[in-house]
Amino acid sequence: MIFLKRFREILTLFLEFMKFGCFTFGGGWSIVSQMQKLYVERKKTITAEELLDLTSVSRSLPGTMIGNVAMLYGYRMAGYPGGVVCAIGLTLPPLAILAVITHFYTLFRANVWVAAAMTGVRAAVVPIILSAVLGLIKGAFQYPPCYAVAALTLGLYLIWNVNCVWLVLIGALCGIVICEVYERRNGNAAA
C-alpha cells in the first residue's frame, strides 16, 4: 500500500513536470511561473518564499536553472526518485520537440508560418516571465531592507557588471546582517 502511494506521488510529479516541459517557451522562468500557480497557489505544497529559495539556489548551481529547480523540488517532495523523475519529465518533451525540429530544420527554417508563429511565441513569453518575477518578488522579502539589497545587487550587475558569485556573497552577508538586526529588535521588544 505504501509502495503504491509512493509510486502514484512519483508518477504525478513526472506527469506534472512533463506538462511543464511541453511549455518551456521562454526558458526556466516560464516554468517557475507554472510551478508557482500549481504548487504555491493551487496545491499549496510549497510557499512562494520556498520556491524563491529553490530558484535562488538553482541559479547558483552549475547546469540549467530550471533543471536544478526540478531536481530540488522533486527531491523535496519524494526524495531522490522524485528529483530524478522531475528532471527527466521536464526534459523529455523539449528533447522530443528538438529532435523533430532538428530532423526537419531546413523545412521549418524557410516556412513563413513557422517564423510568424515563433514571433508570436516570443511576444507571449515576456508577460509569462514578468508574472513569474512579480510573483516571486511578492513573497520574497521578509524585511523591508531586502528591497534595498535587491536594488543594490541589480545595479551592481547591470551597471558595473559585477560577477554573480560576488552578488550572491553580498546578498548572503546582507541577509545575515538584516536578520540579526531584526531578531535583536524583536528580542528587545519582547523583553
Image (spheres, rainbow, N blue to C red):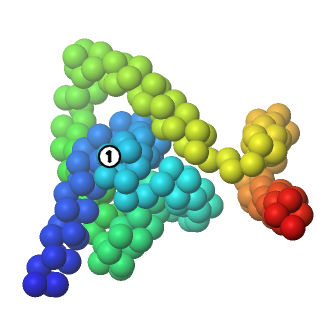
Determine the image quadrant of residue 30.
top left
What kind of residue is marked 1? Answer: Arg
Q: Residue at x 21, y 69 (%)?
A: 9
* The C terminus: image quadrant: bottom right
Q: In this picture, is 126 found above or below 175?
A: above
Position of 176 with respect to 8 (left or right) is right
Q: Secondary structure at mark 1?
A: helix
Q: Which residue is mark 1?
A: 42
Q: Position of residue 71 (x, y in %)?
A: 40, 67
**Badge 1 density bin: few <14, some 14–19, many ≥20, Cα 10 Å:** few
Vertically, is 1 above or below 116?
A: below
Residue at image point 37% right, 54% down: 44
Q: Which residue extends farthest bottom? A: 2
Of the pair 53 and 145, the residue shown nearer to us: 145
Query: At 23% from the left edge and 40% from the top edge, which residue is drawn?
Result: 101
Q: Is residue 40 above or below residue 152?
A: below
**Residue 97 x/y as whole percent:** 22, 45
Q: Position of residue 85 (x, y in %)?
A: 27, 69
Between 174 and 84, the one lying in front of the other is 174
Q: Position of residue 42 (x, y in %)?
A: 32, 46
Decide if residue 84 is on the left or right side of residue 176: left
Q: Give left or right: position of 163 versus 16.
A: right
Quadrant containing the N terminus is bottom left
